[in-house]
Image: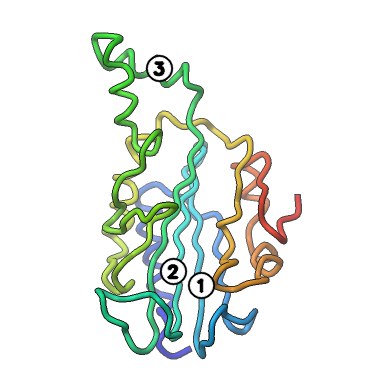
Amino acid sequence: MKGLVENGYFDRIILEMRKQGFFKFAEVVIDQDDVRYHVKAEIARVTSLFFTLPGRALIVQLVCSETDADDHYLIKGEQKKGVKGYWKVQIYHNFLPYGDILRWAAGRVASSADWEAEIDKIPFYRDCPAEIAGIRWLGGGYESQASYEQYNPQAMAKGIWEAVGPSVDLLDRRFPELQVTSFSPHYCFPESGEIFWSRFNRYALRQIVTRPWGSDGLKR
């Protein structure tokens, strides 16, 4: 469809993420041909990319939403005519048990009084970074406030690694369970759950998560 991101852009994102050590285990595209967009639009598409680090309980979800609808998304404070696109980033972790985290902290500082302060520095353990790759935290996820064209694939992948890399050695090997409600674009495309999960690599997900739950269409 005219005005949408070219597939080559997503290919470059995947390539640059691979260079940083990430493995893409699922990619799902939902558009107007599948189900109606939540508001009036001639063009609408959501492309969802899912990455992990082999042997680590980590999932990076990158979502590019595009539409020509006149909705509330503003590009640098002004309504942009034509197709608009923006990024959303979600990071899912499962850290090691607290005792392991405490032993890690004890090995890094001289005094036990400093253990908790050291643990507080672990990205995503207690607090989320203010932004990832220039995409700001907006309470519940990272959402871009600028058009997708301003996010260079190489810089984006590097920024994601810089955000999650310091925590990698403190992650467990699997998620015992994980709520996956936000995996499918259920807000933009209501009733898209069945289609989304039919295209999702559920086998790969179950190698990372023992019990995923919380989304229509996900068959356990």
Disc 3 is placed on an element classified as helix
Mark 1 and mark 2: Cα distance apart in space: 6 Å
Mark 2 and mark 3: Cα distance apart in space: 38 Å
Q: Residue at x 42, y 69 (%)?
A: 10
Q: Is residue 11 left or right of residue 113?
A: right
- Residue closest to the eye, 10 or 178: 178
Dot 2 or dot 3: first in sequence order is: 2
- Residue closest to the eye, 16 or 164: 164
Q: Residues within 10 Å of mark 1 (few under 14, many from 20)?
A: many
> Cβ–Cβ below 8 Å for labels 1 and 2?
yes
Give amino acid for label 1.
Val
Mark 1 and mark 3: Cα distance apart in space: 41 Å
Give amino acid for label 2.
Cys
Residue at label 1? 46
Give amino acid for label 3.
Leu
- Residue closest to the eye, 42 or 33: 42
Percent across and percent down for residue 62 are 44, 60
Residue at label 3? 102
Percent across and percent down for residue 17 are 38, 55
Name the image colouring: rainbow
Q: Is residue 40 left or right of residue 18?
A: right
Dot 1 or dot 3: first in sequence order is: 1
Residue at label 2? 64
Q: Residue at x 29, y 60 (%)?
A: 154
Q: Which of the 4 image quarters holds residue 166?
A: top left
Disc 2 is placed on an element classified as strand
Q: Residue at x 48, y 40 (%)?
A: 93
Q: Which of the 4 image quarters holds residue 30?
A: bottom right
Q: Is residue 99 above or below residue 38?
A: above
Q: Is residue 54 left or right of residue 33?
A: left
